[in-house]
Amino acid sequence: MSVDVAAWFAFTGISSLPPMQLLAGLIGAAAGATVALHSAVMPEIFGTNNFSRAIGYSYLIKVPFLFGAAPLSGYLYDRSHNYGSTFLFFACALCVATAVSILLAFDQRRRYRPA
């Protein structure tokens, strides 16, 4: 996720096409691994018996973001007249997601640590 975060933050400071294409490629390359990691980590956190419920809830949580990202991006562009605020918002959202992921990983380790 840190590659995604860095790429989104880098978007805020560039305005020419070649660097944007490079950053978009980095984001796309990391996105596939994120989906696989999500599916692999869910049974580790919630147990194999709860995998289907946990993955279903996680995708249910993602739906507003999937449908709301484009209108939000348009709104932020209309308000600021550039995409810097949009890129900054998505970079901050990814930072929060990374922090939550790290906290969940530490919580899972503490729960299964031998006494």
Image: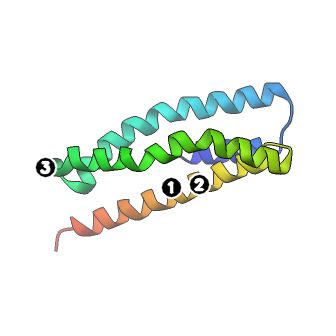
Label 1 sits on a secondary structure element that is helix
Question: Where residue 64 sits in the image (x, y, percent)?
Answer: 49, 47
Q: Quadrant of residue 115?
A: bottom left
Regarding residue 12, the answer to whether it shows in the image is no
Q: In whole angstroms, how far apart are the C-alphas of marks 1 and 2? A: 6 Å
Regarding residue 48, the answer to whether it shows in the image is yes
Residue under pointer 1:
97
Residue ID at (64%, 56%): 92
Label 1 close to label 3 by CB (< 8 Å): no
Residue under pointer 3:
49
Residue ID at (64%, 49%): 90
Mark 2 closeness class: few <14, some 14–19, many ≥20 residues within 10 Å: few
| Disc assigned to residue 93 | 2
Residue ID at (69%, 33%): 23
Seen from the viewer's position, the closer of residues 22 and 64 is 64
Q: Earlier in the sequence, mark 3 or mark 2?
A: 3
Question: Where residue 68 sits in the image (x, y, percent)?
Answer: 57, 44
Seen from the viewer's position, the closer of residues 92 and 102 is 92
Is residue 105 placed above or below 67 in the rendered structure?
A: below
Label 3 sits on a secondary structure element that is helix
Q: Amino acid at mark 1?
A: Ala
Q: Is residue 76 left or right of residue 40?
A: right
| Disc assigned to residue 62 | none
Q: Is residue 2 left or right of residue 61?
A: right
Label 1 close to label 2 by CB (< 8 Å): yes
Mark 3 closeness class: few <14, some 14–19, many ≥20 residues within 10 Å: few
Q: Amino acid at mark 2?
A: Ala
Q: In whole angstroms, how far apart are the C-alphas of marks 1 and 3? A: 25 Å
Q: In whole angstroms, how far apart are the C-alphas of marks 3 and 2? A: 30 Å
Q: Earlier in the sequence, mark 1 or mark 3?
A: 3
Question: Where residue 13 sits in the image (x, y, percent)?
Answer: 83, 45
Q: How is the image coloured?
A: rainbow
